[in-house]
Amino acid sequence: MVLLGCMGEARAEDGYALWMRYVPLEPALAADYHARLADVVAPDQTPTQRAAREELRRGLTGLTGSPPRMQADASQASLVLGTPQSSTLIAPFRAEIASLGDEGYLLRRTRMGGRDVVLVAARRDIGVLYGVFHLLRLLQTGASLDSLDVRESPRLRLRVLNHWDNLDGHVERGYAGRSLWEWQTLPEWRNPRYTDYARANASVGINGTVLNNVNASAQSLAPAYLDKAATLADIFRPYGIRVYLSARFSAPIELGGLDTADPLDPAVQRWWRDKARDIYARIPDFGGFLVKANSEGQPGPQDYGRSHADGANLLATALAPHGGVVMWRAFVYAHDVPADRATQAYAEFAGLDGAFLPNVILQVKNGPIDFQPREPFHPLFGAMPRTPLMMEVQITKEYLGFATHLVYLGPLYEEVLRADTRGDRGGATVAQALSGMAGVANVGADASWSGSHFDQANWYAFGRLAWDPQNAARAIAADWAAMTFAPDPEVVQPIVGMMMASREAAVNYMTPLGLHHLMARGHHYGPGPWVDGGPRADWTSVYYHRADRAGIGFDRTDRGSNAVGQYAPGVAAMYGDLARVPEPLLLWFHHVPWDHRMASGRTLWNELVGRYSQGVSQVQAMQATWDSLQGRVDRQRYAQVAAFLRIQRREAQWWRDASVAYFQSVSGLPLPAGEAAPPHPLAWYEALQFPSAPGDGR
Ligand code: GCW
């Protein structure tokens, strides 16, 4: 309590503590929690047990103002942590927790030896750690413990971050500074930040991390780098996080000196077997490989006339004796294939259902193109019943305004997870088809981890949804806002309101009504609906919007590319029918005349311009909400968010003006009444260059 005075309300915060700030609660609540929980009986024999104790000590001390008393004597307990093996107090609950799996936990208020006790019980230590984080979340959000009774276990087995980090510290599509991994000083220097990274992930149940970019350097598999990765694995292990590596398919050539990487070549097979043995000697619980093959210039089995299944099975065979998995990406498309890019992954993979070894998981992006502000769900989610699938989403906002735009991705993830793959409301959702989720990480060496305070929410929401895809984006936002800012409804409600509206705002000012891939070339910073020419059509905007004098949109019906034919009949019928396609996906699936009548009664042209302007107004509304929070959020974070919203406002206007100027040059139509003309001619927008925009691929 003494601390309260010096911390003060407006204590400056740089965001490093994420949602684990553990700042003092309001005094009555703090006193109540202290009275209920201060006498802790918790084992401390293993690293994970010690991590759980330490987190609890840190959390309770911060939140209640006084440190808990770590008791050895069970009869003193008010908060008991453990597994049936680690605690005699938990042993009687063995049967009850038997069904929770290796990562689940039970939180319960109960009576024990005449005392009121809170239990954090699990089958394994890691479940206890997860339970501690859950309990701390309840305290941070001011929940009542009166009828505490929570049983949780993850619905997805693999909950993995994908770092697109290069060995030189550059992060592809990273907007949060350089890579967290200090390869140069590993394995000797163990930056304490690695442990905080592990804590943050464990707090939301993330249980794996792929350290290096899918555009992989073979060097990541060289002995010196494996030693470095092994140190990270040692640091992450107590937090239940396994290390994985992206494997370059041609590594047997680059590292092994072979003249081929053909998956059917015995020398290649031997090389991977030996490599797996090397890795497991250093990292006994190594998770496995992530592979981008035959995509965007990466090497792969097709270089030798072999299939994706041949390639994946080669690596799976090498890893299987050690318990590792192969996460094989389905993000493939080739510019020499004339077919609609949206159809290419399905065309290559659907026929391979059943051809993969059991330890292969196909990693499919949420939508059929590439992490756009809105896409329909990927058709492979309804097409591979015999293949374990992971859904890959971007947490980093390559196409959604980098780290500066406030765009909460919870609703985007939720929308895809809940999509009905059969279109018959029979419960066959995308979530049902998944064994895991992969999130392309948005963290780097930036003080706030994510490059902005609100982008932390996307890391957080990814973890919570990967743990349980049935979680609601809104409830997750509310938890996050309470923990990150303050557990005060007058703070939480407006922030949740901003967050929940933010994704739709970005869709509106960037790519409304199913438009997609209209960002500037290469770095993807800002609008580029005019992008045309260059090495490949499917890296241009005109390929995707197909606007002409008559109309706009990509005809993917059976009269066009027939991408709709890759969905189950019920879904195809809906998407393929101009009268039934949801308006948010209209121009994804249909080429529509400018005078098409929309649900609002407006013409498509008027609606399009209206949506662009609406996006800008929505950002203005977010600014107004944030302004109203001045004094309720510490000055440092308040100021940065306010500044970033100003950037977003300016860039939303830029998107609107440039897009309206461009599409008007194509449609030749007058602006709807009341719509302001773009302040510059189209050529002005087209001439803008940003050669140093961050995060580019290289
Ligand atoms: O979204 C695109 C990015 C590339 C990325 C690729 C992929 C890692 O622009 O930078 O490369 O997708 O997912 O493989």
Image (cartoon, grey):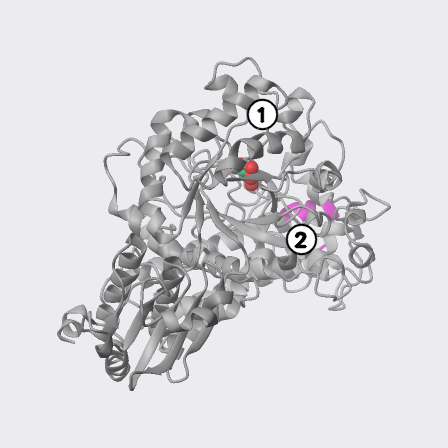
Q: Which residues are magenta?
A: 661-671
Q: Is residue 46 above or below residue 217?
A: below
**Which residue shows up at 46% across the image and 26% down it?**
275
User: If you read the primary sequence from the N terminus, does the residue marked by circle 2 or circle 1 appear first?
Assistant: 1
Q: Is residue 250 above or below residue 383?
A: above
Disc 2 versus disc 1: distance between alpha carbons? 27 Å
**Label 1 secondary element:** loop
Q: Amino acid at mark 1?
A: Pro
The verdict on residue 11 being magenta is no
**Which residue shows up at 43% across the image and 45% down it?**
209
Disc assigned to residue 377:
2
Q: Which residue is mark 1?
A: 299
Q: Quadrant of ligand 1?
A: top right
Q: Amino acid at mark 2?
A: Phe
| Residue 449 placement, left or right of 247 | left
Quadrant (top left/top right/bottom left/bottom right) for the N terminus: bottom left
